[in-house]
């Protein structure tokens, strides 16, 4: 075997794309078969934007959502032609680039709208954009008191079509929160003002994974799940419609050993054996993305049994208590 083909260590992060496809179909049914925008920003949550995007579209997703222009360009270069919404801000110098790549930008203020209009007018074309509004989260988006001024400027932007309006819920993972009701009412009021100003705004969306699964009143004309694509629920307060876990992190036992009572384990000796114990050393640590916050709290599954993490997680090694699986070997 050539040296460059040798595995670095027997630790593998796996993404089950068939499970992703299953989850897309389940989420679509949960949303009343409304069009679904699969959020694949941050390399599809670190799971591979290109592979996840292809599978999501194959399973029925109508849109993709990214945070950066560079993320959208990556998908376009891979010959993905589906509509791609830029959920986050773009720099003014990126206007020409995103138009060339047929990305749908988020407009949240007068400055970027004016730049977008000038870039589209120079090409002699009309481009679609979606209005990002701040319905109460206090983050990116035009606030209610800014909306009329922005729409007034939009009257003089014939080369930019206002094709949609979207916002974010601050407390979607707590479905009973009154803030969700307040934000929904506020958001729908802003949408009404947009339409009164003469814009069709076909795509109206507020529902992330949590709201898709728990707030049918927030489904509107498009839903945009992210975390739930991979079978994860945003909180325990959100119902599970039958999602399949798509992610796994697996490794092997590198060493097993017996420790006498009173033996400290790991940095700082935060774990001390109370009795003679068998421990196992795993070749994975926080340098691989295993959160150090799981030290003394997390578990691994060994033959289906939960083995507690013993002591602090190191950068590239983790110690686990093997007492639940006494015959485990390297």
Image: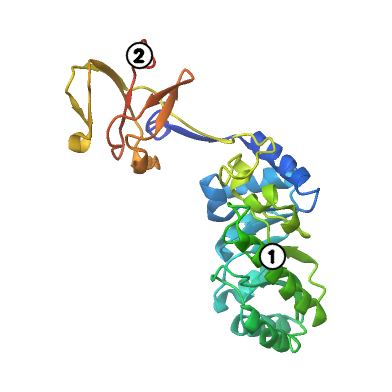
Q: Kindly indicate the quadrant of the structure image that contains residue 82.
A: bottom right
Left or right: residue 178 versus residue 185 is: left
* 49 relative to 146, above or below: above
Left or right: residue 149 versus residue 12 is: right
Please tell me which residue lies in front, 4 or 169.
Answer: 169
* 278 relative to 15, above or below: above
Quadrant of image for the N terminus: top left
Q: Kindly indicate the quadrant of the structure image that contains residue 222.
A: bottom right
Please tell me which residue lies in front, 275 or 243.
Answer: 275
Q: Earlier in the sequence, mark 2 or mark 1?
A: 1
Taking the spot 78% from the left edge, 75% from the top edge, the residue there is: 192
Report the residue marked by disc 2: 329
Quadrant of image for the C terminus: top left
Taking the spot 81% from the left edge, 80% from the top edge, the residue there is: 196
- Does dot 1 land on a helix, a strand or a loop? helix
Real-space Cα separation, disc 2 to disc 1, in angstroms: 55 Å
Q: Kindly indicate the quadrant of the structure image that contains residue 223.
A: bottom right
Report the residue marked by disc 1: 184
């Amino acid at each position: 075997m050539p040296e460059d083909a040798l595995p670095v260590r027997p630790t593998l992060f796996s993404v089950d794309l068939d499970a992703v496809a299953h989850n897309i179909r389940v989420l679509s049914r949960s949303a009343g078969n409304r069009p679904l925008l699969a959020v694949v920003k941050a390399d599809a949550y670190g799971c591979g934007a290109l592979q996840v995007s292809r599978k999501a579209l194959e399973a029925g997703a109508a849109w993709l959502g990214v945070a950066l222009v560079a993320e959208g360009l990556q998908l376009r270069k891979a010959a993905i032609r589906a509509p791609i919404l830029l959920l986050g801000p773009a720099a003014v110098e990126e206007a020409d680039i995103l138009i060339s790549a047929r990305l749908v930008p988020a407009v949240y203020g007068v400055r970027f709208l004016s730049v977008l209009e000038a870039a589209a007018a120079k090409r002699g074309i009309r481009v679609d954009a979606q209005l990002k509004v701040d319905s109460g989260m206090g983050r990116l988006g035009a606030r209610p008191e800014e909306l009329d001024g922005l729409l007034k400027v939009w009257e003089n932007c014939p080369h930019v079509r206002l094709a949609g309006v979207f916002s974010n819920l601050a407390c979607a993972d707590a479905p009973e929160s009154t803030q969700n009701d307040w934000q929904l009412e506020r958001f729908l009021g802003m949408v009404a003002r947009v339409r009164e100003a003469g814009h069709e705004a076909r795509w109206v969306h507020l529902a992330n994974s949590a709201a898709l699964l728990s707030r049918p009143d927030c489904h509107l004309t498009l839903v945009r799940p992210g975390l739930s694509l991979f079978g994860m629920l945003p909180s325990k307060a959100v119902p599970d419609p039958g999602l399949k876990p798509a992610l796994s992190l697996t490794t092997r036992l590198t060493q097993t050993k017996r420790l006498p009572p009173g033996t400290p384990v790991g940095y700082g000796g935060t774990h001390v054996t109370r009795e003679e114990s068998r421990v196992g050393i795993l070749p994975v640590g926080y340098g691989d993305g295993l959160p150090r916050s799981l030290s003394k709290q997390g578990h691994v599954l060994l033959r289906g049994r939960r083995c507690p993490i013993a002591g602090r997680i190191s950068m590239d090694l983790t110690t686990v208590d093997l007492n639940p699986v006494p015959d485990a070997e390297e």
